[in-house]
Amino acid sequence: MKSFSMARPLLVAKLRAALLHGLVTLLVALVSAGVVFYLWYPAPLADKSGGVGLYFLLLLVEVCLGPLMSLVIFNPQKQRSELVRDYFLVGCIQLLALAYGVHSIYIARPVYQTFVVDRFEVVSALELDEEDILAATDKTYRHLPVFGLREVCIERPADAQERSDILFSAVGGKDVQLMPKYYRQCNAGEIEGKAKAGSALIEGLKARGRYEAVAGELPADNNFTWLPVKSRFGVWVEIYPGGRQAEARSVDVDPFVE
């Protein structure tokens, strides 16, 4: 009983240290998660990316690992220099693990939402070759966006041979959306003018028995237009209530699935 009463103050001190360590770790994790999920992988990209799921798991481990390590290393009887050394090493380990996770997510982040004929193609940084980036006609596209997804349109070449080269390249897996030399700023009303009627989406979903699952996400009056969005993360649709792109929102449904 006496030994328990002597150990109790130490346990309380360890728990306090673990709680403080946990709060600091949680704050750092929330800041990094805000950057990842708000700027690099906005919905629905985060839901469709397995890499982001692994990053979330890493954050969970980080938040749990910090307090557990404090329970082990903290001791009020240690000299201050010893505690500083121990926490410095633990902090370095945690920051290195977090930096690895953030870097992995960063280099795979989506950077462009390209409008190609009648659909959007989301392009990630990993999919673009450095030589293609540097070959961009517009200097704006010779540097990848660091934050956010930039919307661009594709300017198809007038030269027949160049169009033929793109066609053969697409067969090999490298389509025009992966060639920044054809990127340009979209004209006013260009995308809205190519959007499909909402009735086409509704009829297609009803025919496949999939309408009820997403009916609540569509405008109640069914007055909208839409475009499909494709990426390596999956397929969904972007709808424009009243045909207005400024009010665009995503609906997690694949319009091509039979």
Image (cartoon, helix red, strand yellow):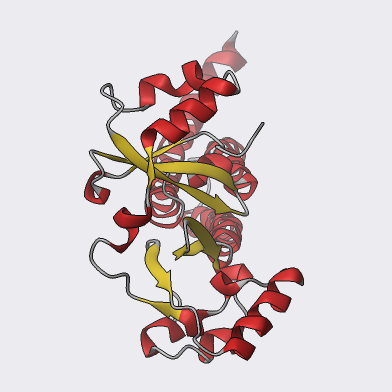
Percent coordinates x, y for residue 215 in the rendering = 41, 20
Left/right of residue 70 with respect to residue 51 in the rendered view: left
Percent coordinates x, y for residue 186 in the rendering = 32, 70
The quarter of the rendered structure image containing the C terminus is: top right
Q: Quadrant of residue 248?
A: top left
Residue that appears at 53% across and 47% down? 78
Left/right of residue 8 with respect to residue 246 in the rendered view: right
Can residue 92 be seen in the rendering of this structure?
Answer: yes
Left/right of residue 18 with respect to residue 51 in the rendered view: left
Q: Quadrant of residue 58?
A: top right
Can residue 146 be seen in the rendering of this structure?
Answer: no
66 or 49, nearer to the observer: 49
Residue that appears at 57% across and 67% down? 107
173 or 150, nearer to the observer: 173
124 or 174, nearer to the observer: 174
Q: How many marks?
A: 0
Q: Is residue 236 above or below residue 195?
A: above
Q: Is residue 9 above or below residue 51?
A: above
Percent coordinates x, y for residue 33 in the rendering = 44, 48
Query: Residue pushed farthest top?
Result: 1
Query: Residue pushed farthest right?
Result: 172
The quarter of the rendered structure image containing the N terminus is: top right
145 or 68, nearer to the observer: 145
Left/right of residue 51 with respect to residue 190 in the rendered view: right
Percent coordinates x, y for residue 18 in the rendering = 48, 35
Residue that appears at 40% across and 70% down? 153
Residue that appears at 39% across and 55% down? 35
